[in-house]
Image (spheres, rainbow, N blue to C red):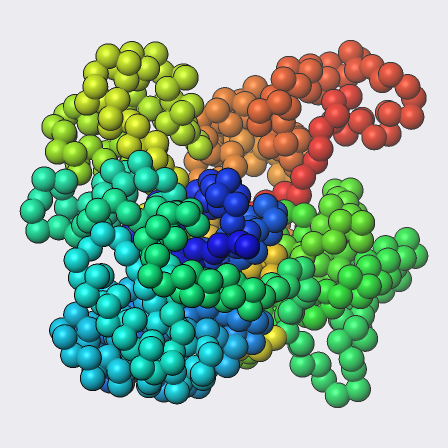
């Protein structure tokens, strides 16, 4: 027989983040269990990471949530609420769970994302409910010695979810109140014939994690360990327990232990990855999506290359169109073309294009990009490749001040329930977590500050890396017990999510209302976001777009307007002369303040040395100025200044390497 823990919380928890979930999965396997449930408080943020890790480890993931249920209406702002554990029995239950959690934020949020019985009744199909912990409605009545109230609540919940789908929950973390509640639960179960289930409320993996968890609680609630009136999880019993430990806790309720296994067997959710859910674009009468896209591109080909374009251009266009059709991305291109057209028609500055999308002649003909992929020999296959099927990714820059107008247009066109911005999470990075833990431990600020500053200030640094790189940090860690404890506790908390916020650019557009595919939440200012991050959104086959607000575009547009106002001269920024010697002379002097990708001190020095004479030199320079390729910079400059020194290993390489003076340099797309 297998045993399943059905109560894995991740609010005030050491179990957040994929690395912690991997530790959890390893522990679950060590304990001989074959399934485990996630029941975050009011949210489903961790569901997909949890699901994927469990599947990879051969463990059945049970998808759930511990929701907050108000006794009245979710629309009335009141602080009273109960806890209720909901588990998805099947895919219908999973979709209903997402809707329940979404309603908690979009309709019932007041300090917590609350739902009411109307929501539960509407979306109860496919869901198994457990009466929850000491904060559950049944338990609250029993704690008050209100047996009749507990009985009424239990019968009400059974009526909502159906006989056999509601269980009375037993827990034992060594608390006196749980003994009282468990006695009442046993009596209710016998009288009402409602089955019981035994669970353990798990907020960390190992028993010895209790100290780190206590520190985390203080960080999240703004308290110190020495504060008397702070939140605590008493008893240290909130770890992942073995079947043997659970049987010892509940010798009087073996059927409740057996029911954990029965519930686990019933819960079977399969989450679909990689299947596209791109919305359909409405095309004019007489067209389907592909014929409309083809017509727009052929018109664009003539506009870009003249009335009688080279047959090779037409062939390239047809190849790209057929690839786009075969990969199922026709609607995607029409959607992007449409909102870029809207922006340009309304005087909103749009960037010339960035990234691999600039390698597509379809993008160029649709005026999604303004970079000629033929002139710059850019590769379409880097953007879309049938041998490496993945969603295309077109990042679009808009005027910083008017970006929201474009998003508003998309919301109006597809519906506010189908267009939502994407969540992102801030995490406890190395220096920050040391400072947080130091405050909780009440270590003098000056000492904590000095320790934090010993962590090297570099990208993606971790405490483990810092201990290897910084001899000062290692020395104080080895000699000062207070610092050792500070660092050890910080290591346990490092990388945990610290807060959620709205991604600066990410927007998802769905075929249907987005809560059909992902749970939604709200930011502090009421903006609706997904509960899944950008990478997860893409994995689920949803259309993710980056609407980037670029201050540079706003400055350029303002400059063009001022030139018009002061001189009467119209300047079209998309058709500037690209070989102005004065511009290259300025760049070669390092006068590149405010020029994207050329404004760092290192890049300014490089440009002074390179002294570019054309755009190709700048493209190659940007490609070279990064770890690895930087080693080729002297050879590139030598070949540029002294062509006679260039050699090729074989004649066939000359055509390929001549533009880069004999160096193998990948020329990426130019950026705005």
Residue at 75 percent across and 60 percent down: it is 362
Front one among 106 and 183: 183
Name the quadrant containing residue 332. bottom right
Residue 237 sits above or below residue 538 on the image: above
Q: Is residue 443 visible?
A: yes
Residue at the (7%, 47%) spot, across then down? 228
- Tell which of 1 and 55 is nearer to you: 1
Horizontally, is 625 left or right of 247 in the view?
right
* Image location of residue 118, percent across then percent down: 36, 86
Residue 398 lies left or right of residue 463; in this view the side is right
| Residue extending furthest toward the front | 252
- Tell me which residue sits at (79%, 73%) in the image: 290
Picture layout, residue 157 above or below residue 392: below
Residue at 60 percent of width and 52 percent of height = 55
> Is 128 on the left-hand or right-hand side of 182?
right
Rendered position, 69 above or below 57: below
How many numbered discs, if any? 0
Residue 18 visible, this orientation: no
Q: Nearer the viewer, residue 391 or 515?
A: 515
Q: Is residue 389 left or right of residue 129?
A: right
Q: Position of residue 585 (x, y in %)?
A: 56, 29
> What is the x, y in percent for residue 367?
67, 62
> Looking at the rendering, in which quadrant would you find the N terminus?
bottom right
Q: Position of residue 417 (x, y in %)?
A: 48, 77
Q: Nearer the viewer, residue 532 or 338?
A: 532
């Amino acid at each position: 027989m297998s045993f399943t823990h059905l109560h894995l919380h991740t609010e005030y928890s050491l179990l957040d983040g994929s690395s912690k979930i991997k530790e959890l999965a390893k522990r679950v396997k060590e304990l001989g269990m074959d399934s485990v449930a996630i029941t975050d408080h009011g949210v489903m943020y961790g569901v997909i990471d949890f699901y994927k890790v469990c599947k990879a480890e051969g463990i059945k993931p049970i998808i759930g949530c511990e929701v907050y249920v108000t006794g009245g209406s979710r629309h009335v702002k009141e602080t009273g609420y109960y806890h209720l554990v909901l588990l998805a029995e099947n895919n219908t239950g999973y979709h209903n769970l997402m809707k329940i959690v979404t309603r908690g934020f979009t309709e019932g949020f007041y300090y917590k994302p609350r739902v009411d019985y109307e929501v539960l009744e509407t979306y109860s199909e496919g869901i198994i409910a457990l009466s929850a912990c000491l904060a559950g409605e049944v338990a609250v009545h029993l704690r008050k010695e209100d047996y009749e109230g507990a009985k009424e609540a239990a019968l009400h919940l059974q009526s909502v979810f159906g006989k056999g789908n509601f269980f009375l929950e037993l827990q034992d973390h060594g608390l006196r109140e749980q003994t009282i509640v468990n006695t009442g639960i046993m009596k209710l179960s016998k009288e009402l014939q409602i089955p019981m289930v035994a669970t353990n409320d798990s907020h960390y993996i190992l028993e010895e994690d209790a100290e780190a968890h206590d520190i985390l609680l203080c960080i999240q609630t703004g308290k110190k360990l020495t504060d008397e009136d702070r939140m605590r999880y008493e008893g240290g019993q909130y770890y992942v327990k073995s079947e043997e430990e659970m049987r010892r806790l509940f010798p009087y309720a073996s059927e409740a232990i057996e029911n954990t296994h029965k519930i686990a067997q019933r819960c079977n959710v399969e989450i679909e990855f990689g299947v596209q859910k791109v919305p359909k674009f409405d095309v004019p009468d007489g067209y389907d999506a592909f014929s409309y896209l083809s017509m727009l591109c052929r018109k664009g080909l003539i506009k870009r290359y003249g009335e009688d374009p080279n047959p090779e251009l037409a062939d390239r266009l047809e190849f790209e169109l057929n690839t786009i059709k075969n990969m199922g991305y026709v609607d995607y291109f029409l959607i992007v073309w449409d909102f870029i057209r809207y922006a340009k028609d309304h005087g909103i500055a749009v960037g010339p294009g960035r990234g691999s999308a600039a390698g597509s002649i379809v993008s160029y003909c649709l005026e999604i990009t303004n970079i000629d992929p033929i002139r710059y020999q850019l590769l379409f296959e880097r953007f879309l490749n049938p041998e490496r099927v993945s969603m295309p990714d077109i990042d679009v820059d808009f005027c910083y001040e008017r970006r929201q107008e474009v998003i508003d247009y998309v919301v109006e066109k597809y519906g506010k329930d189908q267009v939502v911005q994407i969540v992102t999470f801030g995490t406890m990075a190395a220096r920050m977590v040391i400072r947080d833990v130091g405050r909780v431990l009440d270590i003098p600020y000056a000492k904590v500050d000095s320790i934090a500053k010993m962590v090297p200030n570099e990208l993606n640094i971790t405490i483990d890396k810092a201990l290897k790189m910084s001899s000062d940090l290692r020395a104080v860690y080895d000699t000062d017990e207070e610092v050792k404890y500070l660092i050890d506790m910080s290591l346990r908390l490092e990388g945990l999510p610290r807060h959620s916020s709205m991604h600066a650019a990410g927007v998802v557009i769905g075929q249907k209302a987005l809560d059909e595919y992902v749970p939604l939440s709200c930011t502090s200012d009421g903006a609706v976001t997904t509960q899944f991050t950008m990478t997860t959104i893409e994995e689920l086959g949803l259309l993710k777009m980056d609407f980037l607000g670029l201050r540079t575009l706003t400055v350029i547009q303002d400059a063009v307007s001022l030139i018009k106002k002061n001189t009467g001269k119209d300047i079209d920024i998309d058709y500037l002369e690209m070989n102005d010697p004065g511009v290259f002379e300025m760049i070669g002097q390092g006068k590149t303040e405010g020029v994207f990708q050329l404004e760092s001190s290192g890049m300014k020095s490089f440009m002074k040395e390179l002294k570019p004479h054309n755009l190709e030199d700048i493209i190659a320079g940007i490609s070279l100025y990064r770890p690895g390729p930087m080693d080729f910079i002297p050879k590139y400059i030598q070949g540029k200044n002294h062509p006679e020194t260039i050699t090729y290993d074989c004649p066939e390489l000359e055509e390929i390497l001549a533009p880069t003076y004999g160096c193998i340099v990948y020329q990426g797309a130019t950026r705005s």
